[in-house]
Image (cartoon, rainbow, N blue to C red):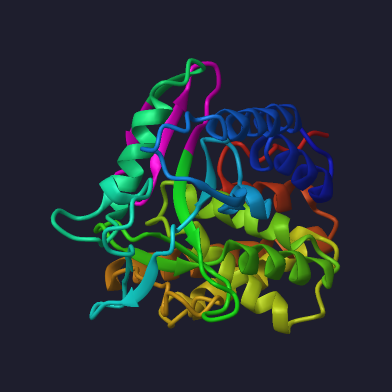
Amino acid sequence: MATTVNAAFTEFMTDYVRLDNGRNEVAKKSKTNLIEQVNKFPNDGKFPRYYDTVSIEYGSYSRRTKIRPLDDIDMMFILHAEGGQLNSRFDGSFDITLPPNVPSNLSGLCFDNSFILNSRKVINKFIEYLGNLTDYEKADIKRNQEAATLKLKSYEWVYDIVPSFITNKETLGEYFMIPDGNGHWKKTDPRIDKERTININSKQKVSVLDIVRIMKYWTARPTMPTMSSYLLENIILNYYDTNESSTVYIDMELPNIFALIYNQIHQRINDPKGFQGDINTLNWNDRNSIQQRAELDYNRAVEARKFENEGNHKSSISKWSEIFGPNFPPHTA
């Protein structure tokens, strides 16, 4: 319950949008424990060797843009390529080809009768060894076949574990190769996304992280098709990368953000890393539905701001609850 719009937003962000601080601390310790256990997989000649750096943060949890509930944590484990060479394929994916007839821990993970590393077999090898960990309930392959999913016994989140290789900095430039879902590999570098998010957030008055979080809450509501969190993040980051006139208040920013979604949802949105091309893969009907909802909620946000400027916090809060649903705190006298 809140008497002012600012108090309502503060309560809403704390209780329903941002990750719970206590659970977040537990998750950090759990992640450290998992890294230690994975790092102790037996050196039996069958599991891939690790690179110098065992793991790297990956996904919205590492960028601090994840919202409640904390349902998954993405982790990349970096493997030693054992002299494997990177070759591009006709469809834009890549092969990693091992040196012929040279024994290595990766030899049994190739496509049949070849020296080409099969990313599905690498994921399955992770699943095999993860299944032996006692603190975890189940290890399985993710539906998109790009990661191994590990379910914990005691906690509400799962780990999406992505095997990866790092390229030679001197010859190719340094980035990572991860499974593409079809047995081959694709480029990524989560460090670019994380650094970009930090830099853009630091130059704005408003918390860009909170803008991303509250808009993720908005798109997850059953009022429209859900856009991918990565697409939504980059639409918002692109805006704040060029717009330096933000205020400190979330509610004052939101009319512009709804207008932004309305104008951008039918546009090409390029991967800022330069690897994926257009990341807006929504179909036409979904784009139209999201655009219509953004228009509706833009008008509601404008009304809410008008009520607040008139000192009518009760009507303003009521209008914001039309946008964000029943969890938005009601006004109290």
In-front residue for pair 229/125: 125
Q: Quadrant of residue 88?
A: bottom left
Task: Kindly tell me whether residue 323 is visible in this rendering.
Answer: no
At a point 56% along the width and 49% down the height, the residue shown is 217
Question: How many numbered marks are there?
Answer: 0
At a point 67% along the width and 38% down the height, the residue shown is 19
In-front residue for pair 24/186: 186
154 part of magenta stretch: yes
Magenta region: 139-159
Residue 133: image x %, image y %?
A: 47, 21
Residue 260: image x %, image y %?
A: 58, 76
**Can you say whether 49 is above or below 91 in the image?**
above
Residue 223: image x %, image y %?
A: 42, 51
Side of 326 relative to 318 (left or right) = left
Side of 95 relative to 199 (left or right) = left
Q: Quadrant of the C terminus?
A: top right
In-front residue for pair 6/271: 271
Residue 149: image x %, image y %?
A: 40, 36
Q: Quadrant of the N terminus?
A: top right
Q: Quadrant of residue 97?
A: bottom left
**Can you say whether 77 is above or below 86 in the image?**
above
Task: Kindly tell me whether residue 59 is visible in this rendering.
Answer: yes
At a point 27% along the width and 63% down the height, the residue shown is 100
At a point 65% along the width and 78% down the height, the residue shown is 239
61 part of magenta stretch: no
